[in-house]
Amino acid sequence: MPRDKYNNAWNSYHHHTELFYDFLHLNRDLRDLDFKHNLEKKLLIIERAEELTKDDNVMRSFRELQELHKMWKEELGPVGKEHREVIWDRFKAATKIINDKRQVYYKEIDKVYEVNLETQT
């Protein structure tokens, strides 16, 4: 490379390298901000699911839980690695309670159907 072009190339290289690292830093900041936003929204979903575990209307709770799962999977992005497992376990625990209540509800309905069938015959 000719000596008169060397300084220009060197300055250009360092300028673009600096821009690259500035972009990476900005990208990390935005990613962290997005992770924080997603964590806040997922915690709200978990709190709502935990409230639904106390609701006596099993079918309404189950339908709303399905909507919460849809929001979790389709509308919200990832959270930081340090939070992923903890919040998923919390949400999964609330989901299990609601699903167990639904299974008990259907077993009770089946018993009523059996009684009705026996009284019909």
Image (spheres, grey):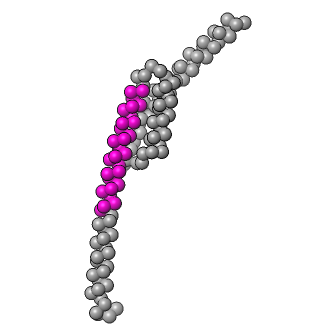
Q: Seen from this angle, which residue lies furthest right?
A: 121
- Residue 38, given in percent of the width and then of the height, sits at 37, 45
Region in magenta: 25-52
Left or right placement of residue 4 versus residue 69 in this view: left
The quadrant in which the N terminus is found is bottom left
Residue 38 magenta-highlighted: yes
Could you tell me which residue is drawn at 63 percent across and 9 percent down? Answer: 115
> In x, y percent, where is residue 120?
70, 7
Q: Position of residue 51 (x, y in %)?
A: 39, 27
Task: Answer yes or no: is residue 14 visible.
Answer: yes
Please tell me whether residue 46 is drawn above or below residue 32 in the rendered image.
above
> What is the x, y in percent for residue 110?
61, 17
Residue 12 in which image quadrant: bottom left
Residue ID at (36%, 36%): 44
| 16 over 92 or under it: above or below | below
**Residue shown at 30% from the left, 71% from the top:** 19
Q: Quadrant of the C terminus?
A: top right
29 relative to 99, above or below: below
Q: Is residue 86 visible?
A: no
Q: Is residue 60 left or right of residue 19?
A: right
Give the tally of numbered discs.
Answer: 0
| Magenta segment, prevailing SS (helix, strand or loop) | helix
- Residue 76 is left or right of residue 82, and the answer is right
Residue at 51% over, 24% down: 59
53 within the magenta span? no
User: Residue 71's image quarter?
Assistant: top left
